[in-house]
Every structure is written in C-alpha cells, then in structure tokens.
Amino acid sequence: MQNCSGSCHCGKVKFDIEISAKITIHRCNCSICKKSGYLHLIVAASRFHLRCGEENLTDYRFHTGVARHLFCRHCGIKAFYVPRSHPQDYSVNLNCIDLPPETEVSIEPFDGRNWSENHEQL
Ligand SMILES: [Zn+2]
C-alpha cells in the first residue's frame, strides 16, 4: 500500500488514502457522473482519512437518496463521496488525488445508467 493525498479545488477539504500500486478506476455513464466527468476509485473506509474540512462539506442526494454526493460548499468540487454501491466506504475522484507516479491505473467503463443490473461489478 502507498499513501496518497487529495483535496477539493480550494483546498479547504483535504484527505489521505492508502492505495495499492495497481488500481482500477471506473468511468461511469450515469446522469451525475457523466456531467461531472467523475472517475471512481473505491476506497475502504479504514483506508480513507479526512484530514480537514468536514465543516465545508455539503451533500446532494437524489433518486434513492442512499449515495451522499459530498462536495465542498466553497469551490463546488466533489473530491469523494459515499456511493450507493459501497455505502460503508468511499468513492474518491481520481482527478482530485496526487497519484504516486509509479501507480498503474486501468480505467474501465461502468454502465451506471443501468445501475441495478451492473452494480455488483464494482
Ligand atoms: Zn473547496
């Protein structure tokens, strides 16, 4: 495992995660991920550490309301959130982390538009 840090755009929300040297990212086509270009890295709650900024997080919920789409209320960036597929864990946006340079990244498409049929692939 290697340590990796991430943040929103303005830097009021910062976090650290532990990731392996080889990670799989999902590019989802659902209504919200498509609009924001979100790239998912699922991280176990035990490997996610919010360093600062909890008071700056706001959540947006829609449809079943299970997913907590957390974003920084200052800059609007969703650097991580609690996904419906893993409500005990986090999904971190690949675009919001400083990836160690040796990390091997594979990006796979995920058909989130048909979430019920496909969520077990995550
Ligand atoms: Zn921010």
Image (tube, rainbow, N blue to C red):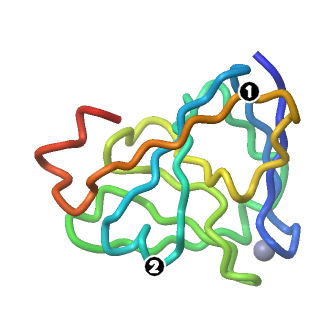
Q: Residue at x 51, y 71 (%)?
A: 59
Please give the residue where the numbered disc 2 appears in the rendered image.
35
Kindly report which numbered mark, 1 or 2, lies closer to the viewer in this rendering: 2
- 21 or 79, which is in the foreground? 21
Check contact, mark 1 vs mark 2: CB within 8 A: no
The percent position of residue 7, horizontal first and vertical second, equals: 80, 58
The image shows residue 118, relative to residue 75, as above or below, that is: above
- 71 or 96, which is in the foreground? 96
Image quadrant occupied by the C terminus: top left
Image quadrant occupied by the N terminus: top right
Determine which of the numbered discs, if any, sits on residue 18 in the image.
1
Seen as rendered, the residue at the extreme left is: 117
- 107 or 88, which is in the foreground? 107
Q: Which numbered disc, 1 or 2, marks the residue that appears first in the sequence? A: 1
Left or right of 53 in this view: 114: left
The percent position of residue 69, horizontal first and vertical second, equals: 48, 65
The percent position of residue 77, horizontal first and vertical second, equals: 67, 74
Which image quarter has ligand 1? Answer: bottom right
Callout 2 amino acid = Lys
Please tell me how crowded label 1 is: few (under 14), some (14-19), or many (20+) other residues with Cα within 10 Å: some
